[in-house]
Image (spheres, rainbow, N blue to C red):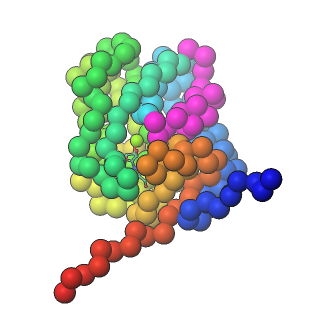
Amino acid sequence: MAPPSTALPGRTLISASAIQRRVRTLAHDIRTHYGDHPLTVVGLMNGSLFFLTDLTRHLPPHTRIECWRVASYRGRTSTGKLRGLDAVISGDYRGRHVLIVDDILDTGLTLHHVQRKLRALHAADIKICVLLKKEVSRRHRLNAHWVGFSIPNRFVIGYGLDLNHAYRTLPMIRVLPEARKEKSLA
Ligand code: 5GP
Ligand code: MG
């Protein structure tokens, strides 16, 4: 029987091995920064699924992990709205040092609202770690304290990042060709 087609969309931007190497150095820097201070890591699902898992494997045993499910994208475009933060948030954040872990910083909408929510829950200190940061002028100004890779302003998939729920399982980051422009009627 013929094997299933292995053709994948786009081209590899960051290889699986480069991701794993960078995740280890990020985890080392994070460990050094927090030392023995108790830490809660909040991973934003589903995009940070693999990044959160690989990163926190290298953090101390007393590290707490919480997963928040939020979404702002539909297909290849940001809806400009964040869904999911009204749901019941588990965990106790009062007085805690919190590290938000997300797959990618794009417009900043997601991390802006998540940060605000954590402030309302009285977290003592909030920092951000993203695997990818797009080189764009952001609608929401915010500071990501740890960034894996800066990438061009293009749509990417793999290592947790999806296109309409597919391709999250790829071990590398791939960049898709630019979406075709709508045909002009002029
Ligand atoms: P922001 O709220 O900063 O605009 O976008 C953050 C969220 O949008 C990310 O957590 C991710 O879920 C989604 N996103 C932004 N850019 C991309 C992209 O290039 N590819 C994919 N698959 N998701 C993206
Ligand atoms: Mg996301």
Nearest to the observer: residue 42 or residue 45:
45
Does residue 13 sit above or below 102 in this rendering? below
Q: Residue at x 43, y 63 (%)?
A: 154
Q: Position of residue 32 (x, y in %)?
A: 57, 31
Q: Position of residue 98 (x, y in %)?
A: 40, 25
Does residue 156 sit above or below 111 in this rendering? below
Q: Position of residue 143 (x, y in %)?
A: 35, 45
Horizontal side of 69 relative to 159 (left or right) equals left
Q: Is residue 107 magenta?
A: no
Range shown magenta = 46-62
Q: Quadrant of residue 115?
A: top left
Q: Quadrant of residue 54?
A: top right
Q: Is residue 99 visible?
A: no
Q: Is residue 47 magenta?
A: yes
Nearest to the observer: residue 184 or residue 17:
184
Does residue 44 sit above or below 40 in this rendering? below
Horizontal side of 52 relative to 84 (left or right) equals right
Q: Residue at x 49, y 21 (%)?
A: 65
Q: Residue furthest right?
A: 1
Q: Residue furthest bottom?
A: 186
Q: Is residue 14 visible?
A: yes
Q: Quadrant of ligand 2?
A: top left
Horizontal side of 48 relative to 169 (left or right) equals left
Q: Residue at x 42, y 33 (%)?
A: 44
Q: Quadrant of residue 128?
A: top left
Horizontal side of 112 relative to 10 (left or right) equals left
Q: How many numbered marks, from 0 up?
A: 0
